[in-house]
Image (cartoon, rainbow, N blue to C red):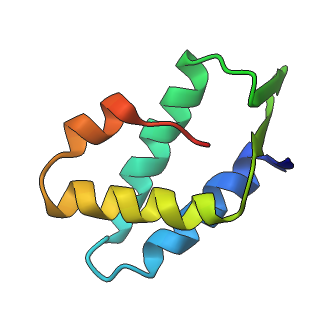
Amino acid sequence: MLDMDLEDYLEEVKFQMTLWDYLEEEMILEWEEKAREWVDTHEDKRMIKKGEDVTILFKSEDIFEELARLYYRAKRDNTEEEYWKKFKLF
């Protein structure tokens, strides 16, 4: 199991999103805002919260590319609402 500070984790996902030409900066920043809201409102044993610090536990770095790909598809297919209903960081 790997672990990463939330800030670094989000930066890795956002970097992967920049590789998709379709995803503009404002879309990526919108994703980040909603992902942070998700972290604030959900509890999971794969998120370790200590005060304002959050550590994310995950199995593979492939998750960054996967999250970027799923978000790209949601934007492209206009299924973003469904994307956020099923959203998970890990």
Residue at (72% x, 44% y) in the render: 6
Q: Position of residue 11 (x, y in %)?
A: 64, 61
Question: Residue 54 lies in what quarter of the image?
Answer: top right
Q: Nearer the viewer, residue 2 or 53?
A: 2
Q: Quadrant of the C terminus?
A: top right
Q: Position of residue 77 (x, y in %)?
A: 13, 58
Question: Residue 84 lies in what quarter of the image?
Answer: top left
| Residue 90 left/right relative to 20 | right
Residue 27 visible in the current orientation: no
Question: Residue 86 lies in what quarter of the image?
Answer: top left
Residue at (50% x, 39% y) in the render: 35
Q: Position of residue 18 (x, y in %)?
A: 45, 77
Residue at (31% x, 71% y) in the render: 24
| Residue 35 left/right relative to 44 | left
Q: Position of residue 9 (x, y in %)?
A: 69, 54
In the rendered view, tell whether residue 76 sits above or below residue 52: below
